Amino acid sequence: MKNKFIKEWLPYIIIIIVVVLIRSYIITPVIVRGSSMEETLLDGEVLFLSKISYKINDIERFDIVVIKDSDGDLIVKRVIGLPGDNVEYIDNKLYINDEEIDDIYANTITNDFTLEEICSINNDNCNGKIPDNKYLVLGDNRVVSADSRVKGLFSKEEILGKAVLRIWPLNKIKILN
């Protein structure tokens, strides 16, 4: 009787354990909330978040990431500034390390800001550069986005992973850049 029970239920138990482990440590779904990433991502879309991407690779500029902010909310933003960068917006133009960068993802006007203003939000000691282990993120729809301009820089630990695939709605399934 005991062997029959184990023989019948063991495959199901293994499947459940594997699914829980995959969801906990490798990939998990995330729902986009709000309009801060429009036109790239819309409210209610479902993404797959890779939790292991940044254990294997470095965070790169323009990656779409999911962050757990200080309020405990999950927010989806785009990485703009990396550790060691000096980032500023002047006259709706993005400058990184004093070089103008083509910011093709911004779909609205971005008000001027300096790195010093962002660093002052959480009393980060920047000295003209983003500190080690910190990142500056912005939403693509800058007019409504509560991003680094409001919440300050984010640490690598607050970045849960990289958004890699939009899975919902089905007619918009796409690998994300």
Image (cartoon, helix red, strand yellow):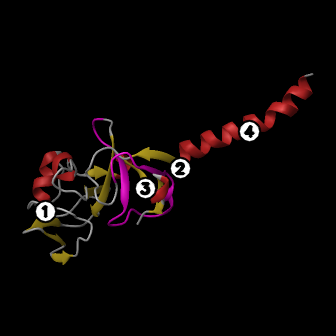
Task: Inspect the image, locate mark 4, and give the three-letter code of the amino acid beneath it.
Answer: Ile
**If you read the primary sequence from the N terminus, does the residue marked by circle 3 or circle 2 appear first?**
2
Relative to residue 149, is residue 49 drawn left or right?
Answer: right
Task: Inspect the image, locate mark 3, and give the three-letter code of the amino acid beneath it.
Answer: Ala
- Label 1 sits on residue: 109
- Give how far apart the Cα atoms at labels 3 and 2 are: 10 Å
Query: Which element carries disc 1, helix, strand or loop?
Result: loop
- Give how far apart the Cα atoms at labels 4 and 1 are: 51 Å
- Label 2 sits on residue: 27
Which residue is at a point 23% across and 67% down the rendered structure image? 85
Identify the magenta region: 42-71
Which residue is at a point 61% across and 42% down the rendered structure image? 21
Query: Which element carries disc 2, helix, strand or loop?
Result: strand
Where residue 110 sits: x, y (%)? 13, 61
Query: Which element carries disc 4, helix, strand or loop?
Result: helix
- Give how far apart the Cα atoms at labels 4 and 2 are: 18 Å
Relative to residue 46, is residue 62 drawn left or right?
Answer: left
Residue 163: give its label.
3
Residue 123 visible somewhere in the drawing? no
- Label 4 sits on residue: 14
Do residues under tags 3 and 1 come within 8 Å of each other at their CB atoms? no
